[in-house]
Every structure is written in C-alpha cells, then in structure tokens.
C-alpha cells in the first residue's frame, strides 16, 4: 500500500468509526439536541467517504444511513459444492466468477439462505453439510469497506437440478484448484477457494476457520 492509499484508508477508517458511533447514538440517545448532533455526524461520515472514493454521496448515505439500532456486520453466505475434486463456480454478467451466494435475508437461517442462493444462482437443489469458515471481509480481503461483512462458507452436497441462465448469472461450471478462472475478488478470493478445497479433502478433521 503506497502513501496515498494509506492516507485514503485512514480517512475511511475515521468515517467508519464516526458512522458507527453516530448510529449507536441515534439508537440509544434521548435528548433531541443530541439526536440532531448524531444525525449530522452520520451525514459528515458519509460525505467523508464520498470525498475520498468514487462513490456518490447518495450511495454512501444509502449504505450508511439506511439502518437503525446498534451497527453490526452484514452477513454474506457462500455455497461450496464439489464434484470430482472440482468446485462449482457461477459466472456473473461482468464475466467474472464466484461461489454462489449473496446477502443473507432476514427471517431465514444461514442454512436456508445458502441453499436459496445456490438454487437461484446455480439452479441446484443441495443439502448443507457443514460450515467451513466465518471470515471478516476487512481482515481477509485486504481493504476496508464502509460497513462490516462476515462471510459464511458452507460446504454443500449436490442433490438435483441443473444450471439455467438467469438475471444474476450467465454460466455455471466446475473448476479444479489449478484451473480457476478470473474471479470476482470483491466476493471471493483464490485463497478462500483453496481453503474450501482443503476443507472438502479433510472433512472428518476440519475445524471451522474464524477470525
């Protein structure tokens, strides 16, 4: 990371902390004047991010200012399916590949969410077998984002079905560890996929990875 990147990261760190403090203040504050101050602090944090990134103020406010209560990470679920020591990946409209998955919906468990995503993106009915890892995106993908994300990797087994092109994905294939295509690194990294291969090969001894 060069000096300019370090400087931008500091600004983002400060903005994220301000947003978190402001959201907690809005959730628990009682005095109307304090509420006004917390609202303004939240707006400033969004303006800081917009100033230091290519994200518009409106988009940042949508990310920062759309939730209430104590700020907690968002949950991203990823289904991991193997066949003949090859992993199933889906191709997005930008041509890049990822494990099937996405944001967890409210009122659905982790298991229900991952099976729903596998069905929607890969056309497959599957069974969820075990959790491979719970990873913090900031710590594992090298760059802080305006909100925390915990990524849940779930090892699944194919039951039935086949891929059909849909509004989210254009292709679905199995890949060996040495033949991975261009990945959508905002959603998955080669290191994380390698971890999934290790988990599949050592199911009986595997211990959930978390940080």
Image (tube, rainbow, N blue to C red):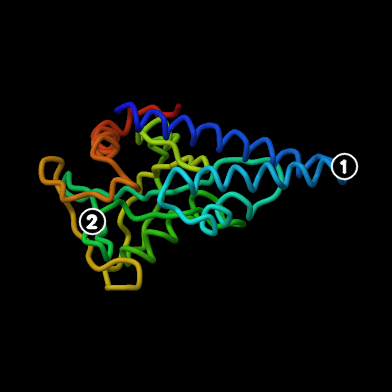
Q: Which residue is at a point 36% across and 50% down the rendered structure image?
A: 79
Estimate the spatial distance between the alpha carbons at disc 2 and disc 1, rounded to whole Å: 48 Å
Which disc is residue 30 wearing? 1
For the residue carrying disc 2, how many other residues have a C-alpha within 10 Å: few (<14), some (14-19), or many (20+)? some
Do callouts 2 and 1 mark residues in contact (Cβ within 8 Å)?
no
**Between discs 2 and 1, the one toward the N terminus:** 1
Q: In front: 125, or 133? A: 133
Residue 174 relative to residue 150: left or right: left
Label 2, secondary structure: give it.
loop
Residue 65 place in picture, x, y as percent: 63, 52
- Is residue 113 or residue 125 the one in the foreground? 113
User: In the image, is 60 to the left or to the right of 102?
Assistant: right
Residue at the (24%, 60%) spot, across then down: 91
Residue 80 % position (x, y): 32, 48
61 and 177: which one is in front?
61
Task: Say which residue appears at 35% left-offset and 44% top-offset.
Answer: 155
Q: Check the image and report above or below for 207 versus 123.
A: above
* Image side of residue 123 versus residue 150, left or right: left
Q: Is residue 208 visible?
A: no
Q: Is residue 6 left or right of residue 27?
A: left
Mark 1 Cα-neighbour bin, 10 Å: few <14, some 14–19, many ≥20: few
Q: Quadrant of residue 89?
A: bottom left
Question: If the image is split into quadrants, where does the C terminus sit?
Answer: top left
Q: Quadrant of the N terminus?
A: top left
In the rendered image, the vertical position of residue 102 relative to residue 151, given as above or below: below
What is the x, y in percent for residue 154? Answer: 39, 44
The residue tagged 2 is: 96
Q: Secondary structure at mark 1?
A: loop
Mark toward the viewer: 2 or 1: 1
Measured from the top left, where is residue 171 in percent x and y? Answer: 22, 65
Residue 176 disc label: none
Total marks in image: 2
């Amino acid at each position: 990371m060069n000096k300019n990147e370090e400087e931008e990261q500091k600004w983002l760190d400060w903005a994220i902390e301000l947003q978190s403090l402001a959201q907690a203040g809005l959730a628990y504050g009682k005095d109307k004047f304090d509420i006004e101050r917390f609202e303004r602090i939240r707006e400033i944090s969004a303006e800081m991010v917009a100033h230091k990134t290519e994200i518009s103020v409106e988009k940042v406010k949508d990310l920062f200012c759309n939730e209430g209560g104590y700020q907690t990470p968002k949950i991203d679920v990823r289904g991991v399916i193997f066949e003949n020591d090859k992993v199933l990946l889906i191709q997005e409209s930008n041509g890049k590949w990822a494990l099937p998955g996405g944001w967890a919906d409210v009122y659905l468990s982790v298991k229900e969410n991952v099976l729903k995503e596998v069905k929607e993106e890969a056309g497959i009915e599957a069974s969820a077998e075990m959790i491979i890892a719970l990873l913090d995106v900031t710590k594992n993908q090298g760059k802080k984002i305006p909100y925390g994300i915990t990524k849940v990797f779930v090892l699944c087994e194919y039951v039935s079905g086949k891929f059909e092109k849909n509004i989210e994905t254009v292709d679905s294939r199995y890949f060996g560890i040495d033949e991975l295509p261009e990945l959508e690194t905002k959603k998955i990294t080669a290191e994380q996929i390698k971890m999934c291969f290790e988990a599949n090969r050592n199911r009986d001894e595997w211990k959930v990875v978390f940080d």
